[in-house]
Image: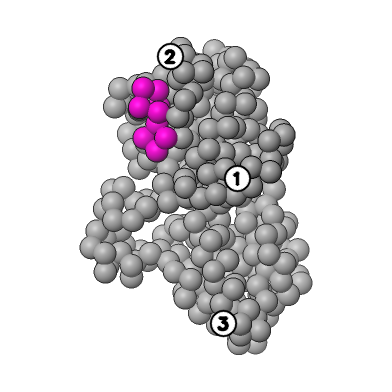
C-alpha cells in the first residue's frame, strides 16, 4: 500500500472523481498554473485542461458565486479557498445561497458543491489568518462540515463529499499537508457522519478532530505511562456529528475530554458537551472537560502563540482531572 502525503490524498480524490464524472471541476486562486498554493492540485491542469482546472481572480465572493451558479445548473464545483479565513469575503454566497437554495426552492434546485481549503491556525500567521471555522459553518443548517485528521480519511471523505450532492465545507490544514499515511490504490469511500474509534481504551473517552486528534494521540501515549488508558474518537465529520459513537464509548469509560481547536464559547466542544450530558449524564463519573483555544485572537509573537495554542500537556491535565474526580 503506497504512502501518500495529505495533499496527495486530496489530489488523488479529486483526480479520481474528475475522471469518473466530467461535471466535476476545480476552481480557485492559483489552482492551475501555479499547481495550487500548497501544491494540492499539482499536475491537474496538465491532465484536465483549463476548462476544468480554473484559476480565478482574488475575489472570493465572485468565484464562490460562480460555483453556486454552476452547481444550480448541474455541475459539481470544487471551490478552493487559499485559506478559510478568506472565505469570509465570499460567505454571503456560502450561507445565503449554497446552504439555503435547496430548502427555499422546495427541493427543486440541487446544490452539489464543495468548498475546501486550509483551516485554523498554522503557526505565526497573525490573528486574521488563524481562525478555526468548522464551528462557524456547522452553525448553519444546510451545510455539512468535514475536518479529516489523516490522509486516508481525507481521500475517502472527499470522494464521498464530491458524490454527496449537498453543499459541503471540507477543512484541511497547512500543517498536515506533508503528513504521510498508507492509502490504498483501490477505490474506497468513507461515509459522511461516521466517526471512528482510532485508539481503544477503557478509562476515558477523548474526542478530537483535525490537528487536535494528533495532540490527543500524543497525550494518550504520555498517559499510558501513568496507567491511564485513553479511548480516542475522531469524529471526522463535524456536521452531522456521530454522537452515538461517543455515547457508546462513554458508557464504557464513564469519563470524557473534548479537544477542540475552536474558541470556548459556542465551539464544537460546547455543543458536544451538551449532547453528552443530555444522552449520557447517568454514565458520567466526572464532569466533561474540554481543551480549547482561549477566548482571544491568535497572537503573532512566538512566545505568546505557544501559550495560546492547545498542547498535549493540557490534554494530559484535563484527562487527569476527570480521572481523579468522583
Quadrant in the picture for residue 234: bottom right
Which residue is drawn at the image coordinates 51% and 50% (left, top)? 179
Q: Which residues are magenta?
A: 31-39
Q: Nearer the viewer, residue 293 or 154?
A: 154
Quarter that holds the C terminus:
bottom right
Lateral position of residue 231 relative to residue 81, left or right: right
Q: Residue furthest left?
A: 301
Figure disc tally: 3
Q: Nearer the viewer, residue 105 or 43?
A: 43
Q: Which residue is mark 1?
A: 3
SS for callout 3: helix
Image position of 100 with respect to 208: above or below: above
Q: Which residue is mark 3?
A: 320
* Within-10-Å neighbours for mark 1: few <14, some 14–19, many 20+: some
Residue 277: % across, % down: 64, 67
The overriding secondary structure of the stretch rendered in magenta is loop
Residue 50: image tag: 2
SS for callout 1: strand
Quarter that holds the N terminus:
top right
Q: Is residue 34 magenta?
A: yes
Which residue is drawn at the image coordinates 67% and 52% (left, top)? 195
Q: Is residue 248 visible?
A: yes
Whole-angstrom CA distance, mark 3 to mark 1, is: 35 Å
Between disc 3 and disc 1, whose residue precedes? 1
Which residue is drawn at the image coordinates 73% and 75% (left, top)? 202
Which residue is drawn at the image coordinates 30% and 22% (left, top)? 57
User: Which dot, 2 or 1, sits closer to the camera?
Assistant: 1
Whole-angstrom CA distance, mark 2 to mark 1, is: 29 Å
Q: Nearer the viewer, residue 248 or 187?
A: 187
Amino acid at each position: 500500500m503506497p504512502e501518500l502525503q495529505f495533499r496527495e490524498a486530496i489530489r488523488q480524490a479529486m483526480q479520481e472523481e474528475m475522471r469518473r464524472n466530467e461535471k466535476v471541476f476545480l476552481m480557485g486562486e492559483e489552482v492551475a498554473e501555479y499547481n495550487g498554493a500548497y501544491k494540492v492540485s499539482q499536475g491537474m491542469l496538465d491532465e484536465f485542461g483549463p476548462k476544468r482546472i480554473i484559476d480565478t481572480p482574488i475575489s472570493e465572493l465572485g468565484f464562490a458565486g460562480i460555483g453556486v451558479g454552476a452547481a444550480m445548473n448541474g455541475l459539481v464545483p470544487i471551490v478552493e479557498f487559499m485559506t478559510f479565513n478568506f472565505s469570509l469575503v465570499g460567505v454571503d454566497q456560502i450561507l445565503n445561497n449554497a446552504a439555503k437554495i435547496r430548502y427555499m426552492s422546495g427541493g427543486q434546485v440541487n446544490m452539489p458543491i464543495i468548498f475546501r481549503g486550509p483551516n485554523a491556525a498554522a503557526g505565526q500567521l497573525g490573528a486574521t489568518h488563524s481562525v478555526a471555522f468548522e464551528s462557524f459553518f456547522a452553525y448553519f443548517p444546510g451545510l455539512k462540515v468535514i475536518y479529516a485528521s489523516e490522509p486516508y480519511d481525507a481521500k475517502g471523505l472527499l470522494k464521498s463529499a464530491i458524490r454527496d450532492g449537498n453543499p459541503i465545507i471540507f477543512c484541511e490544514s497547512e500543517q498536515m499537508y506533508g503528513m504521510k499515511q498508507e492509502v490504498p490504490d483501490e477505490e474506497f469511500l468513507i461515509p459522511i457522519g461516521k466517526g471512528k474509534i482510532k485508539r481503544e481504551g477503557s478509562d476515558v473517552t477523548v474526542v478530537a478532530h483535525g490537528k487536535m486528534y494528533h495532540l490527543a494521540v500524543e497525550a494518550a501515549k504520555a498517559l499510558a505511562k501513568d496507567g491511564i488508558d485513553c479511548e480516542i474518537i475522531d469524529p471526522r465529520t463535524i456536521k452531522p456529528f456521530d454522537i452515538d459513537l461517543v455515547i457508546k464509548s462513554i458508557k464504557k469509560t464513564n469519563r470524557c475530554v473534548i479537544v477542540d481547536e475552536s474558541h470556548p464559547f459556542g465551539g464544537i466542544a460546547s455543543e458536544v458537551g451538551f449532547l453528552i450530558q443530555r444522552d449520557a449524564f447517568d454514565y458520567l463519573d466526572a464532569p466533561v472537560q474540554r481543551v480549547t483555544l482561549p477566548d482571544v485572537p491568535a497572537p503573532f509573537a512566538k512566545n505568546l502563540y505557544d501559550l495560546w495554542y492547545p498542547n498535549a500537556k493540557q490534554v494530559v491535565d484535563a484527562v487527569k482531572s476527570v480521572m481523579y474526580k468522583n
